[in-house]
Amino acid sequence: MFTNSVRPDSSSSPQNILLLAITRMGDMLQASPTIVGLKKQYPNAKLTILTDREFSAICRGIPGIDEIYEIDLALVCRCLHRDHDGVVDAFEYMEKVVEELKARQFDFCLNMASAGYTAILMKMLEIPRTSGWISDDEGNRLIHSPWSMLFAAFVYHSNRDYNSLNLVDIFRCSAEVNQHPRRLMYTVTDEARTFNEQFIKDLELGEDGPLICLQAGASQQKRQWAPNRFGELCRLLIERLNARIVLTGAKSEEAIASAVLSSYSHPRLKSAVGKTNLAQLGALLEKADLLITGDTGPMHLSVAVGTPVIAGFLASALCYETGPYGPGNIVVQPQISCNPCNPNFPCARPDCHDQISPELMYRLTRLRLETPIGQESQMQVPTELAHPDAVRVFRTDFDQDGFLEFVPINGFGMRKGHPEQYFDAIRTAYRRVWKEELNGAPERPLPPLVSPPPLMVVNDVFSSILEGLDELTRMADAGVGLVDELIRLIKDITSPPKLLGEINMAMTIMDRSIEELGLSFPALGALVRMFIMEKENIRGEDPLLLASQVRSLYLSLRKRCDKFNRIFRAEAFGNVRQNHLTRAEHVVSFENR
Amino acid sequence: MWRTGERDLDILCGGPSSYEANQSSVALELGCGVGRILRATSFRFGKVIGVDVSQEAVERARGFLADRPNVSVLLGNGEDLAGVATSSVDFAYTFAALSSMPVDVIAAYLSELGRIVRPGGTIRLQVYVGSPQDTVADDSIAIRSFAQEAFSAALAASGFDVENYFEFTLPFEISDPEAGLNARIVSARRSDRQTAPRENVQLLLLPEGEAKADGEWPGSRVEYWMALTRARTHLDAGELEPAAKALEFATAHYREADKDVVDLLNEIRRDLQARQSTAACAEPVDLLGKNLKALEARFPEVANIVRGALAQSGDSTGELSISMTADGEPIISAPGLPLDHAERPRRAAEVWAGRTLNDQRFNEAQKVVCVGLGAGYHLESLLERRSQGVFLFEPRPEVLAAAVKIRDLSQLFSRLEGLVCGNEMLARSSDILSGAYLVLHPQTAIYSREGVDQIKRTISRKENLRSLRPSIAVVGPIYGGSLPIAGYVADALKQMGQRVHYYDLSKFVTAYRALDEMVKTPQRINALQGYYVEMLSQIVLEGITERPVDMVICLAQAPLSPRVLSELRNRGIITAMWFVEDCRRFSTWRDIARYYDYMFIIQQGEILREVEAAGAGKCVYLPMACDPNFHRPLEVSAEERARWGSQVSFLGAGYNNRQQMFAHLARMDFKIWGTEWPFGAPFDKLVQEKGRRIDPSEYIKIFNSSAINLNLHSSMERDGVEPFGDFVNPRTFELASCGAFQLADNRLLLPELFEVGKEIITFDDQTELEEKIEYYLAHPEERIEVANRARARVLKDHTYVQRMEVLLNTIYADRGEEIRARTKNSPWEKTFQRSEAHSELNEKFRKVYERGNEPKLEELVADIQLGKGALTRTEHQLLFLHHVKTQISYVHKLRATGQ
């Protein structure tokens, strides 16, 4: 169950750990492998989780937590909206919270949240070792651990598209957890199971047929599939599979549930929306054969109770980031130039919804139900059903290092004018660069530097990234040269201050050029972003020490460029010929559709 | 008066089931007085009837409301509403009247209301509920309070269904829950029921009835206030005797009667006495030598002043006369005004001293200043009770000179801690008196009103300026001469540590000016400008809604519409206008004065009364000034001097008189700066930089680079110097503040601002101007001397800071307590209190407060974000809260919009 990979360097074992996870239900569940892993790694350590009162219920089902400290952010907001003395009330409340937390004398804190206030809270708690966002003395956000930096780099919208590391693994690695259960964890209580037995009976769905849960609501409207599509899917499932279907969701999602029910009604389709608490929902999902959902909290809960999911990742949702963490799930990611979109803006025309049909979802459901557990690698989806130009279908699995991966099961198409392999090659390159460079996996021998095949049209497609890589490598080399000169000047006490100033200026210009390169070559954005963040994180007084830290950053940028280059070329050019064939076939099959 | 009437009518019509008036309805006010509320009522109802039992009040109300044809005011008989037809009234109300009536009268009126109000009609009565008070039947001042159930029962018996009792607030205390006095408005609707006889109603109200005999009564602050309100009503009606009665009630029954009330009472008494008294003459006794000796020993400076006054008047006492009472006590009288009690001055002084002693503040004060001596009876009585820390300020040396002739005051002088005589000495000695508690000799308060005002200002000035911190909005014009002044005013207030928010509307000038590019018809342009002003007014109003203020100070031409000014007043905001224009030439003040509680103008004399007559609450002379931080001597480079400098210069617009006079100076090294000059000779040569508008920052370069700066006040009518020009323009002060030499035309008000000939050189006509230019060009050292003296003078007396001190002190003197009360009720008070335990947070709140902003997290965080260096724990915590607030609001917004 647990995987063993390289144990990262760390100082003495923490005894008293605080996890900051003031976020949503799904995020909390996504932290569960880290929590369980930490407990496994440090069995004697006390593990406290700090969470918003609104989300504390979910924590009670996550194994390995010794204490849940609830912070009432709603109360804080109510006080603050009163202004005047309300500000003082909020201030005093937070003062109490900080004092109570400090009194617990934590020796390690992992901030798993990305909100700015958690960084400041981390600072106020004055815990000796931290990971994740923290605020510095002047209130600026800093990140100490490289994995947390990676998280920040991929939060950056334009970099998202090139990431294939799941957030669960990123969290896990930022806590230096390498032994972990390969799934999310949630314990269903017997009480909830008992409730659920009766509950399902009362729904009178019938005795036979697969029990399928369906989560129609999502956190954002644009990530919510249309009710009539869900209705149609239900019709297919009931008529063809004799399925028993239960709509799940919170009370706030009653509107969409009733819209689904009004578009299709059948005695085997019932709603549990708003009728179960979190624990009871867990029991319901545990009992089900399958959950059909978007990227939602119940999706994670389902995985956590061991029930596979079929998940459609719409709008801003990206399966690589937040897909179901566990083997054998099926996810669908629409292929449309705007997907994944910016999570901060609404969408009036969610065209990505049209890429997924009820028929496809029905067929995937059938595929999952009919494939025995353990034989998921046999699952394939014909392109006639799900054309890779329109939608990508993946099954989830774990790679050799214990990281979640998404294995395409409907072939490769074209995307944004590039063959899909181009993006996959970038993702694969990044995946390995970060795993190895950030101590998440052992370093393995690199493939030889493959040259692109001569006279190929695809050359143009790939040439820009290769040019960018060459330039970035040269810049890293130049950076090393500048630092060497700087070190020489620092050591030579006779060197004029003017020269030092000039070198510093040259380095500033160099870093600015590197930053601009990252923007000009979006695919290299994450490499550059990491470099910038690591550079911003350098602190100290001794100029020589500072210079040597900067030097090692340029060197590691150089090394990452080289590694990225080799893996990318091997991945991309190894598949190029095949890609061209597939491309031709696609055109034909597309026209025949 | 009308303003509070509006307010109180709003209160009456408001409440949980607010009453919608309409033009076809008939309203009746019971106890309408001089018609304070009736006026407001007359605008909302078709027909309005006022009833009052005071003949004088009714007559005055009829006079006041002669312009309101739908109002009729009836003289009541205190028993019924005989003149009003049955079921003829839709809405009847009473405010601050019913609860002072004896119970049997209240019962009678309730019963009568039942008769006159039509079924379905509404009554709104301001009453007191809580516990019944021990009142006596013939007392028309004490407050009646009833058990709420009893009052409801009485209303029910009168045919009304009670809807609710609701609370309301006024700018002063109106309830005293501990005493069982809770001010409420009762709202009731007339049912179809018959009304019970008034005897039954009375039994329901107060079964045991009211006592007939007088007795001990403890008094409460609310009743005290109510008595004052009644006195005020009587004073408004010109009824001195009932006013005095009400005030006597207040001072006698309430232990801590305010000083002002006692003084007012004494004033009224004196007035009444003055009406009755006849001047009686007696032989003055010569005690001069003894008194002067005693005075010389203790207060030599005052002795000199008195000798000076004696020398001037010789044997006479000027307009003062000396007389003897029947008991042979000498008293001093001004024409028509005895300065002591005309019959029993000792007894009156005793009573006055006794009252004064009852004031707690008197006993707690370290220093007490008695203002006014009269013949000395009052002060003697006071000194008998308190021998330490008593000072005397007598504003008029002639009074002291008269007193030392007729009474032996040597003992009195020896017991005084200090003595200041005359306003000049006061100006020099203000420090001795600062922080003192003031007691007014009542007659002096009348006879030397200005002197009293001056010492009040002197003493309260520092204290009020230090302790009162209202939030002030300064509103300037869109453009024009008063625009920079608005900025100077705001800066001065800030320098004084006041909490100021400056609404700089000059940002809107481009669009305003663009209006007449789009439209050409003058009427249309006017209409558009009106809309634009209305919009700017609304912008200011919205700003003030967002960050509330206690006071708005507007500069002339500030674009605030009557609607918005009225709204500001409705919110209890004090409105002040500094009309820095020639009131005689620009009469716009006539239209706006009534919207301002205070008008400050730059002219003196009859015009002050005219502005008040136009409706301004109070009009005060406030001359122009300078801002020494801005108007200052500059080091001018040779290059700048070449551009800006000349032997003679003038800065200003090309008014007719300037054109006429300056044309003669064409052959001098003379530069003219400014707009609206003619194009032809000689101005084509004299006017600089194509007659463009010059910025204030450029003014000072011109002032500092010119040997002689001409300052000719504008006139459109004359060809030269305005012969009776009175006000002094800002340029006079600005030039002086820059240390620049100026030749200014003579102004009537100039001599009291500058010593002419020494601090400023003036001219009366063309010849004198040219002679003086020639003379002073030849005598640069004299120019420097005059300029230095002028600068010293403006720094001492004529800065915007000093003007704002006068302005604020004028307002504080009248409204200080109100501002104090507002501040106490503002969210700040609670915020400071709550944050006391967190010194850094408290300090941060204080900074926000000083800026005149509201106690909001965003304001606290704005300071942190602007700061540098490591954050403190408190700052981290505030930043945390700020992030939480914005982040969670953002999430809620996302959820709300369904994204």
Image: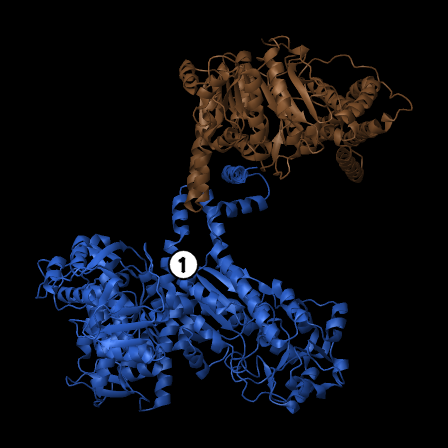
- Three-letter code, disc 1: Ser
Q: Which residue in the protein does label 1 denote?
A: B467
Secondary element at tag 1: helix
Q: Residue at x 42, y 51 (%)?
A: B828
Q: Is residue B333 left or right of residue A557?
A: left
In the image, B532 versus A22, the foreground residue is B532
In the image, B166 versus B719, the foreground residue is B166
In the picture, which chain is blue? Answer: B
In the image, A403 versus B617, the foreground residue is A403
Crowdedness near tag 1: few (<14), some (14–19) or many (≥20) residues, C-alpha within 10 Å:
few
Q: Is residue A206 left or right of residue B791?
A: left
Q: Is residue A578 left or right of residue B515?
A: right
Image coordinates of residue B656 in percent, x first then y, are 65, 85
Residue B730 visible from this viewpoint? yes
Q: Residue at x 83, y 20 (%)?
A: A581
User: Which color was chain A given?
Assistant: brown
Relative to B612, say whether A14 is above or below. Answer: above
Q: Which of the 4 image quarters holds residue B657?
A: bottom right
Image coordinates of residue B246 in percent, x first then y, are 21, 70
Relative to A503, say whether B624 is above or below. Answer: below
Image coordinates of residue B630 in percent, x first then y, are 61, 66
Marked residue chain, label 1 = B
Image coordinates of residue A219 in percent, x first then y, are 55, 31
Quarter of the image that includes the N terminus of chain A: top right
Q: Which of the 4 image quarters holds residue B116?
A: bottom left
Relative to B256, say whether A136 is above or below. Answer: above
